[in-house]
Amino acid sequence: MTLTNELIVAAERTFHAAGSKPKDVAGILSKLASDYQCEASVEGGLLTLKQGGVPASVGNIVAAYREKHPRDFYGEAGEVRYKSDLAGDIAAKARFIAERGISVWDALPANEKSPGAQNVTNEVIPHAGMKAAEYARLSRAEKAKLAGEIGPRGIERILARR
């Protein structure tokens, strides 16, 4: 598959229309070709895909790809564990800091290869705005640290959320 500018722009437009913001369109197209045996082309300014020479549902393939590789899209990495999860998405970074605070942002490792990243074992970063289900997944040490920061009233509020 030859990655032309027209193909990359069409793929980006299609991903955006599907509600996704890709980090690296060329990388995604390459993975679609290798992992899903998809041939990508442009038709009417949008991405079209064929698998084995047969037209394929772009929506289904994009959904399957997003499910398998959520970190390739901004804002779809689930719980943010690394600063790189929000790299390049200023609005998502601003929302994260507004919801959880600058101290939580500063405590995040830059990426999975950063020093200290191996200490990020829980997909949930303890914070006062979390839900009861997220709180239940914390370790005892994380619960104790959070209780020390927000107090018993804060823990009560967390446990009341569904």
Image (cartoon, rainbow, N blue to C red):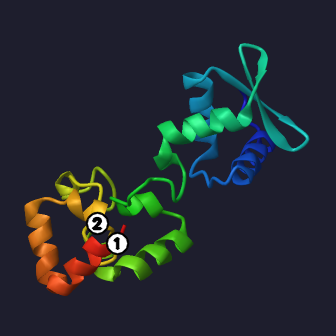
> At 53% from the left edge and 57% from the top edge, which residue is drawn?
74
Q: Position of residue 77 (x, y in %)?
A: 45, 53
Horizontal placement of 117 versus 59: left or right?
left
**Lower sequence index among marks 2 and 1:** 2
Number of on-image labels: 2
What type is the residue that disc 1 sits on? Arg
Q: Residue furthest right?
A: 44
| Residue 7 visible | yes
Q: Residue at x 28, y 50 (%)?
A: 113
Residue sitting nearer the eye, 44 or 127: 127
Closer to the camera, 9 or 15? Answer: 15
Pointer 2: what residue? 132
The spot of residue 19 in percent (x, y) is: 67, 54
Q: Name the residue nearer the viewer: 53 or 8.
A: 53
Using the numbered discs, state the Cα–Cα distance from disc 2 to disc 1 in whole angstroms.
6 Å
Quadrant where the C terminus is found in the figure? bottom left
At label 2, counting other C-alpha atoms closer than 10 Å, the crowd grade (few under 14, some 14-19, many 20 or more) is: some
Q: Quadrant of residue 91?
A: bottom right
Could you tell me the amino acid type at mark 2?
A: Ala
User: Quadrant where the N terminus lies?
Assistant: top right
Q: Is residue 49 above or below residue 102?
A: above
> Are the residues at dot 2 and dot 1 in contact (C-beta closer than 8 Å)?
yes
Task: State the residue position of label 1.
Answer: 161
> Helix, strand, or loop for circle 1?
loop
**Horizontal side of residue 16 vs 99, given as left or right:** right
Which residue is found at the position 11% from the left and 74% from the top? Answer: 145
